[in-house]
Amino acid sequence: MKRQASSRRAERKALRRRRPARRNPAYTLDRPLSDERVVTSYNNFYEFSSNKGLPRILAQKLTTQPWSVEVTGLVKKPRTWGLEELLRAFPPEERLYRLRCVEAWSVAVPWTGFPLVALVKKAEPLSDARFVRFVSFLRPSEAPGQNQTNYPWPYHEALTMAEATHELAFVATGLYGKPLPKQNGAPIRLAVPWKYGFKSAKSIVRIEFVRERPATFWNTVLPLEYDFTANVDPSVPHPSWSQASEKFLGAWNQDAEERPTLLLNGYADRVGGLYQKG
Ligand SMILES: Nc1nc2c(c(=O)[nH]1)N[C@H]1C(S)=C(S)[C@@H](COP(=O)(O)O)O[C@H]1N2
Ligand SMILES: [Mo]
């Protein structure tokens, strides 16, 4: 118990020291940032509720300190990182990213964190590691949604190795210059801005390097609606709605703004090369 208390103190200290981080000017936007109140009160976090307004309230029950992330699988250097060790090892920066949910709403947010490729490199993946798997916590006593046994908990997602090592794939530990709010996936989540939001797992406890393409949460639940790759593409409709446009949630107390969906969510110039055929 004592040891836990002191490690909690160390994590809080590390979080404070790391924020705010310097904004990386390479990641700018074609739109204003969404209001912080919008981003922290309209959430998808099924561990707590499928109602967008409830994660803000219900996720406060999640114990996020202490926290550790196990990096494992086909790597030379498996390691369990305490959160404060991660914050110390990887220098933080701020990036402005778009976030596009498959449900056709979007926000624009300032994440604090570090590129996923840095963590991948530290693990020294073996040559037969072809996919990276991200697993969220499993704690039904704190997360009421996890008592819904029709879902394959814990939440799990994955990227190809090429995607995971792309400079845009980001590990977020903060939002709007503050530690990540629980409803947004504290204390550590992914931000993969060219893919639909469900690819960016929240509250990650394990990162695993594997050879075969792993099953992923929404693809398992509804395979005809949510594919593995899930790249944002205006020309590929969801079976029940068009993806040609999106509702951008910007200012608090203002209607969402209808905008055309951008190919790869506006990141085609950076990540398009990953998907070129031939
Ligand atoms: N563990 C976990 N991660 C998750 C989800 C979830 O339900 N559980 N929802 C996903 C979906 S569908 C979206 S759109 C984004 C939403 O992130 P935000 O609430 O921070 O905007 O988180 C993704 N990550
Ligand atoms: Mo989503």
Image: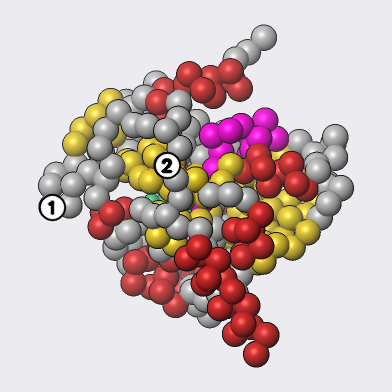
Is residue 171 shown in magenta? yes
Ranked by sequence position, the earlier of labels 1 and 2 is 2
- Image point (41%, 63%), residue name: 181
Camera-near label (1 vs 2) is 2
* Pointer 2 residue: 23
Q: How is the image coloured?
A: secondary structure
Height in image: 206 above or below 226?
below
| Picture coordinates of residue 155, whole percent (x, y) | 57, 57
Q: How many marks?
A: 2
Query: How many angstroms separate mark 1 from mark 2 (CA)?
Result: 27 Å
Residue closest to the far left: 254
* Pointer 1 residue: 253
Name the amino acid, label 1.
Asn
- Image point (39%, 55%), residue name: 177
Dot 1: element: loop
- Image point (85%, 36%), residue name: 128
Q: Is residue 122 left or right of residue 165?
A: right
Q: Identify the mark at residue 60; answer none if there is no mark.
A: none
Q: Residues within 10 Å of mark 2 (few under 14, many from 20)?
A: some
| Picture coordinates of residue 273, whole percent (x, y) | 58, 18
